[in-house]
């Protein structure tokens, strides 16, 4: 990692640790751990973790799972070049199913559609889980999570409740705690941008969206079933953010639960199984283009007023 990158990451961590959340600090809600876990027992999630698959979400072994792609490649995997979400998935309420179908119809017509990632907008949670790389920087009271694009950064306050009054943010309000060898992150308050979706199939969300993430280092053998399910469903992207296919050591597994009774009939779950990256951290940024692929004017992010 070059010195410039080290400086940026250190600044991010220090700034986040000292910053005051932009929320009202009145009556707090949520559950806070009564004891802080000792530093010696906190799991170490450092390193560059790779999951270079599209569109990323791993179907669960059983029970309600995410919307998947009905368009398949000849090898049976999801066809990333044609995103046609399964609007008949029973987790979807009628209006949500209609929206997913609309996006799929655009793909089937060869038109494509705008998403947060192809428009360089923050994706929110769980949309961001599609990304290929993850790093975590852990301190006792704060965790910084950095994804592949340089502007994709999440901040998690440890052992704190959600505020009673919160202002929606791009990645929501995330609070975390350790449950033994597992990092548990609870996120609410996801901001809706111009492309409000929680996956690449256009699945919508409301202000009731609630996501719980559980990160844990597990043996390869314990994660093998999820790895196999991912290999059958998602397309391997590789190229600069890959892993060693012969690696059989510990993997970082994210198990997440999504609920939003404005969109879904029931909570659903999925996993992301990360393996250590064999490539260095890339220096990437998503650059806005004032023109879209169809030559229309893009809705790239702009600031209403100067930051300083």
Image (tube, helix red, strand yellow):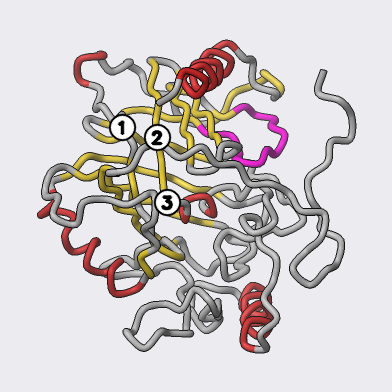
Residue 157 is situated, as x and y percent measured from the top left of the image, at 50, 24
Q: Residues within 10 Å of mark 3 (few under 14, many from 20)?
A: many
User: Is 282 situated left or right of 101 in this image?
Assistant: left
N-term-proximal mark, 1 vs 3: 1
Answer with the quarter of the image where residue 118 lies: bottom right
CB under 8 Å between discs 2 and 1: yes
| Residue pictured at 22% horizontal, 32% vertical | 181
Please identify the quadrant where the C terminus is shown. top right
Highlighted range, magenta = 163-174
The answer to whether residue 122 is above or below residue 167 is: below
The answer to whether residue 13 is above or below residue 165 is: above
Q: Nearer the viewer, residue 98 or 79?
A: 79
The answer to whether residue 200 is above or below residue 106 is: above
Mark 1 = which residue? Answer: 47
The answer to whether residue 6 is above or below residue 75 is: above
Residue most extreme to the right: 305
Q: Residues within 10 Å of mark 2 (few under 14, many from 20)?
A: some
Mark 2 = which residue? Answer: 135
Residue 204 is situated, as x and y percent measured from the top left of the image, at 64, 64
CA–CA distance in space, label 1 to label 3: 14 Å
Residue 132: which disc? 3
Mark 2 falls on what kind of element? Answer: strand
| Residue pictured at 57% horizontal, 71% vertical | 201
CA–CA distance in space, label 2 to label 1: 6 Å
User: Is 242 situated left or right of 149 in this image?
Assistant: left
CA–CA distance in space, label 3 to label 2: 11 Å
Let me know if residue 176 is in the magenta part.
no
Let me know if residue 165 is in the magenta part.
yes
Residue 57 is situated, as x and y percent measured from the top left of the image, at 41, 62
Mark 1 falls on what kind of element? Answer: loop
């Amino acid at each position: 990692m070059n010195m410039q990158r080290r400086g940026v990451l250190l600044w991010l961590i220090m700034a986040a640790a000292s910053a005051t959340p932009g929320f009202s600090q009145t009556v707090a809600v949520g559950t806070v751990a009564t004891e802080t876990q000792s530093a010696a027992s906190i799991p170490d999630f450092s390193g560059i973790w790779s999951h270079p698959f599209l569109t990323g979400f791993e179907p669960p072994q059983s029970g309600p799972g995410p919307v998947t792609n009905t368009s398949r490649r000849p090898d049976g995997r999801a066809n990333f070049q044609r995103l046609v979400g399964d609007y008949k998935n029973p987790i979807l309420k009628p209006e949500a199913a209609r929206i997913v179908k609309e996006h799929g119809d655009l793909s089937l017509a060869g038109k494509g559609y705008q998403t947060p990632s192809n428009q360089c907008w923050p994706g929110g949670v769980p949309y961001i889980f599609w990304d290929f790389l993850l790093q975590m920087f852990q301190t006792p009271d704060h965790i910084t999570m950095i994804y592949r694009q340089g502007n994709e950064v999440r901040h998690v306050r440890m052992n704190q409740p959600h505020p009673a009054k919160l202002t929606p943010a791009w990645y929501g309000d995330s609070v975390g705690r350790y449950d033994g060898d597992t990092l548990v992150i609870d996120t609410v308050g996801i901001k809706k941008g111009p492309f409000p979706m929680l996956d690449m199939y256009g699945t919508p969300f409301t202000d009731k969206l609630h996501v719980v993430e559980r990160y844990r280092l597990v043996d390869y053998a314990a994660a093998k079933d999820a790895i196999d399910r991912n290999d059958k469903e998602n397309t391997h992207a590789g190229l600069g953010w890959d892993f060693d296919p012969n690696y059989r050591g510990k993997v970082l597994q994210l198990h997440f639960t999504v609920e939003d009774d404005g969109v879904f009939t029931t909570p659903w779950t999925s996993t992301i199984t990360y393996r250590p990256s064999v490539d260095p951290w890339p220096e990437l940024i998503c650059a806005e283009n004032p023109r879209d692929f169809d030559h229309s004017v893009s809705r790239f992010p702009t600031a209403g007023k100067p930051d300083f």
